[in-house]
C-alpha cells in the first residue's frame, strides 16, 4: 500500500493533500498544548503532507520554535517545500530511520495508513518527549452498518485500519505510550462545505454529542480523537 503515496495515486485522489482542513487541525493541536502549558522548542510531523499543519502552527507557537516535516512521498514533498524557511524544514525521507529527537512529534491521521502500525508506533515513541496523534474513529455503528464508507476510505485515502476511541487508546498503551489527555474532534460538524449526506447527520450528531459524546462517536461516527502522550 505504500506505493500509492509514491506512484502518484494518492495525489490523483487527493490533489490538495488535505490542506483544506489543516488550519482546523492545527487549532486543536494548539488547544491541547495550551491545556498542558507545553511550549515545545522543536516540533516534528511525520507524514506532514502538504505542510499546512506545520505552517499554521508556526504562526501560533513561539518565534524560536523549530519545525521539521517528514514525508515519504515526493508528491507531498513538492507541495510542502515552497513553505520551507529559516524555522521550517521539509525532508523527503523516513523519520524512523534517522537518529533524531524532538520536544514534540505529531502523527496526524497517519498510523491508520501503515500496514504494521505496531512497529511504526514503537519506533516513533523514541523520537520525542511528547507525542500528539489525531486518529479517525471509523468504527461506528453507522459506518459498520453501511459498510461501503469503510471500503471507500480504504480505496480513496488508504485507511487500512479502523479504530474506536477504546481501541485507539489501547493500541497506544500496548505500544508503550502513557496517554496524558485526549478529546474528540469532528470535521463532520465543525468544518464547512459539507456534502448533503454529512449535512443530514450534522444536527443529530451535535444533539447526541451534547448528551453523550461517547455514544455520538460510537453510534453516528464522524469523530476523531486527538491524543497527547508520552
Image: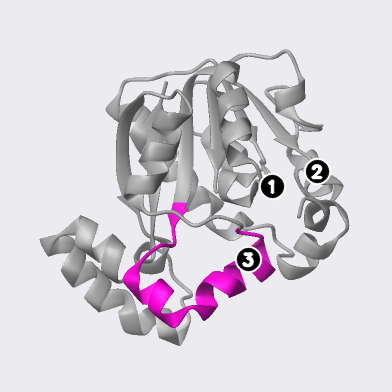
Helix, strand or loop under label 2: helix
Helix, strand or loop under label 1: loop
Q: Residue at position x 69%, y 32% from top?
A: 69
- Locate residue 77 relative to residue 16 in the image: left or right: right
Find the residue positioned furthest to the left.
211
Q: Residue at position x 62%, y 14% from top?
A: 101
- According to the picture, the residue beneath numbered tag 3 turns out to be 154
**Where is residue 99 drawn, in percent x and y?**
73, 13
* Residue stretch rendered in magenta on the structure: 136-159
Residue 227 seen in the current view: yes
Task: State the colouring used for the structure image.
Answer: one colour
> Total of numbered circles in the picture?
3
Residue 30 seen in the current view: no
Lower position in the chain sequence, tag 1 or tag 3: 1
Q: Which mark is residue 49?
A: 1
**Where is residue 174 drawn, in percent x and y?**
43, 31
From the image, which quarter does the C terminus lie in? top left
93 magenta-colored? no
Amino acid at each position: 500500500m505504500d506505493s500509492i503515496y509514491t506512484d502518484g495515486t494518492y495525489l490523483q485522489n487527493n490533489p490538495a493533500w488535505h490542506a483544506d482542513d489543516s488550519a482546523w487541525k492545527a487549532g486543536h493541536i494548539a488547544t491541547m498544548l495550551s491545556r498542558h502549558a507545553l511550549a515545545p522548542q522543536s516540533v516534528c510531523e511525520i507524514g506532514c503532507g502538504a505542510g499546512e499543519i506545520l505552517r499554521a502552527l508556526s504562526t501560533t507557537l513561539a518565534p524560536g520554535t523549530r519545525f521539521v516535516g517528514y514525508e515519504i512521498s515526493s508528491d507531498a514533498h513538492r507541495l510542502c517545500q515552497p513553505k520551507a524557511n529559516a524555522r521550517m524544514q521539509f525532508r523527503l525521507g523516513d523519520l524512523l530511520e534517522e537518529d533524531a529527537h524532538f520536544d514534540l512529534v505529531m502523527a496526524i491521521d497517519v498510523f491508520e495508513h501503515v500496514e504494521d502500525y505496531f512497529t511504526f508506533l514503537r519506533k516513533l515513541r523514541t523520537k520525542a518527549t511528547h507525542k500528539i496523534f489525531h486518529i479517525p474513529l471509523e468504527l461506528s455503528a453507522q459506518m459498520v452498518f453501511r459498510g461501503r464508507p469503510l471500503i471507500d476510505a480504504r480505496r480513496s485515502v488508504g485507511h487500512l485500519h479502523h479504530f474506536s476511541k477504546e481501541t485507539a487508546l489501547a493500541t497506544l498503551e500496548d505500544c508503550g505510550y502513557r496517554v496524558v489527555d485526549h478529546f474528540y474532534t469532528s470535521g463532520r460538524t465543525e468544518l464547512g462545505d459539507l456534502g448533503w449526506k454529512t449535512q443530514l447527520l450534522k444536527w443529530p450528531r451535535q444533539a447526541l454529542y451534547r448528551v453523550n459524546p461517547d455514544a455520538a462517536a460510537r453510534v453516528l461516527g464522524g469523530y476523531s480523537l486527538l491524543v497527547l502522550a508520552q
